[in-house]
């Protein structure tokens, strides 16, 4: 299929507002100069997609902030697809040909703001992310366009497409691990063994810390964390995880704590189990504001608090990890649903007990 052979309309999930997502006919995008169109092969449902669906203030706004989501919009920022349209100069710029599998980083930088000019493109002030902004419609559709200025990559055909949809969350997980500044003698705790947390475990394993601990309320997910490289897996619903971590570290606590649950209790838990001078990495998008005792951060422990946002420069690493088979992807990608069953997919992610990574196939 070439650009002039593309159909005029496609099936797409349209977000009209919180809880109001509909499968509709929508015009197929066409590529302009420097643009790429792919036929979507697989698209994941992210925890942030769920929070947007549920109406979290960070996406829809409240009295303190403007909402981030610009509805109506096609959601979906975890995706892979076949290149079916190349605008002028796009093939040369990205090293892509018709028929290639390709992904695009979730953010399309403006190239003009302070952060882009400094090379810190993942913090772009405009912040056009696929699936949330009008310039960057997402991939819960049959086709999606990569705008000019997007950061695109070819995907090896050896990676199954339902695995390749995991490139985006894995790339984010790698960045979070990098922010932890893990050393060989560190004890590292990763809170949350969902799609992001499992990627963090696999990435942290490559750092070879002294002890790597995974926490989750779901024992099945903890078993997968073990396959990703965790030395110890603990369920906070079954044991005193703070006490256990202290026992495993001669009473000092963990050196690095990475929060990937999205639950406020995990923040307080981490502050309790981390050692003095430790590094706390906050990754999650919280639905509501979180309140903690900030005295722990300063006067009590003098902690390093690092945020982790998106996936700067880590897509190639994620692609390499998947190509090398470093993760148990058959265990991580638990559901592959047709696009028409998007609501079932959202419900599975919301429930969280019967799935890990849920993908849709247009």
Image (cartoon, rainbow, N blue to C red):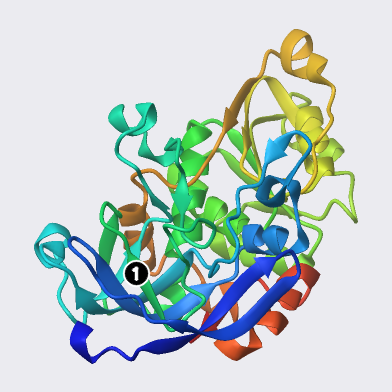
Residue 255 vs residue 295, the one in the foreground: 295
Residue 202 vs residue 22, the one in the foreground: 22
Q: Is residue 12 above or below residue 151?
A: below
Residue drawn at x 46%, y 44% is: 127
Residue 197 vs residue 228, the one in the foreground: 197
Residue drawn at x 34%, y 75% is: 29
Q: Is residue 99 above or below residue 68?
A: below
Residue 155 can be seen, yes or no: no
Query: Horizontal placement of 250 versus 238: left or right?
Result: left
Query: Horizontal placement of 50 versus 291: left or right?
Result: left
- Which x, y percent locates residue 3? 21, 83
- Which x, y percent locates residue 340? 60, 90
Residue 265 image-quadrant placement: top right
Q: Is residue 140 above or below residue 299?
A: below
Residue 106 can be seen, yes or no: yes
Residue drawn at x 67%, y 75% is: 21
Quarter of the figure that contains the N terminus: bottom left
Residue drawn at x 70%, y 51% is: 60
Residue 212 image-quadrant placement: top right
Residue lying furthest top: 299
Residue 324 vs residue 134, the one in the foreground: 134
- Which x, y percent locates residue 223? 68, 67
Q: Which residue is mark 1?
A: 145
- Which x, y percent locates residue 63? 79, 37
């Amino acid at each position: 299929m070439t650009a002039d052979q593309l159909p005029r309309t496609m099936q797409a999930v349209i977000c009209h507002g919180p809880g109001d997502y509909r499968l509709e006919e929508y015009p197929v995008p066409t590529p302009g100069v420097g643009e790429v169109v792919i036929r979507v092969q697989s698209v994941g449902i992210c925890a942030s997609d769920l929070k947007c669906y549920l109406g979290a203030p960070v996406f829809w706004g409240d009295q303190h902030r403007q909402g981030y989501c610009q509805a109506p919009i096609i959601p979906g920022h975890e995706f892979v697809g076949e290149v079916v349209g190349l605008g002028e100069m796009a093939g040369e710029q990205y090293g892509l040909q018709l028929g290639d599998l390709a992904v695009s980083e979730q953010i399309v930088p403006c190239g003009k703001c302070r952060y882009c000019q400094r090379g810190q493109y993942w913090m772009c002030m405009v912040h056009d992310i696929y699936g949330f902004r009008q310039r960057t419609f997402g991939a819960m559709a049959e086709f999606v366009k990569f705008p000019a200025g997007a950061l695109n990559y070819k995907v090896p055909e050896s990676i199954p497409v339902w695995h390749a949809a995991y490139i985006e969350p894995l790339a984010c997980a790698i960045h979070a691990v990098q922010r932890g500044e893990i050393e060989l003698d560190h004890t590292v705790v990763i809170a949350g063994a969902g799609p992001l947390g499992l990627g963090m475990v696999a990435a942290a394993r490559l750092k070879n810390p002294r002890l790597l601990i995974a926490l989750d309320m779901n024992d099945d997910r903890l078993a997968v964390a073990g396959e990703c490289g965790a030395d110890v897996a603990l369920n906070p619903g079954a044991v005193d995880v703070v006490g256990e971590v202290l026992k495993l570290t001669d009473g000092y606590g963990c050196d690095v704590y990475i929060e990937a649950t999205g639950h406020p209790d995990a923040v307080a838990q981490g502050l309790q189990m981390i050692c003095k001078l430790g590094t706390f990495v906050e990754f999650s998008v919280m639905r509501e504001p979180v309140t903690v005792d900030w005295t722990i951060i300063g006067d009590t422990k003098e902690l390093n608090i690092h945020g982790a946002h998106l996936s700067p420069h880590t897509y190639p690493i994620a692609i390499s990890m998947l190509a090398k088979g470093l993760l148990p992807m058959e265990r991580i990608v638990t559901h592959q649903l047709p696009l028409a069953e998007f609501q079932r997919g959202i419900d599975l992610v919301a429930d969280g007990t019967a799935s890990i990574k849920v993908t849709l196939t247009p």
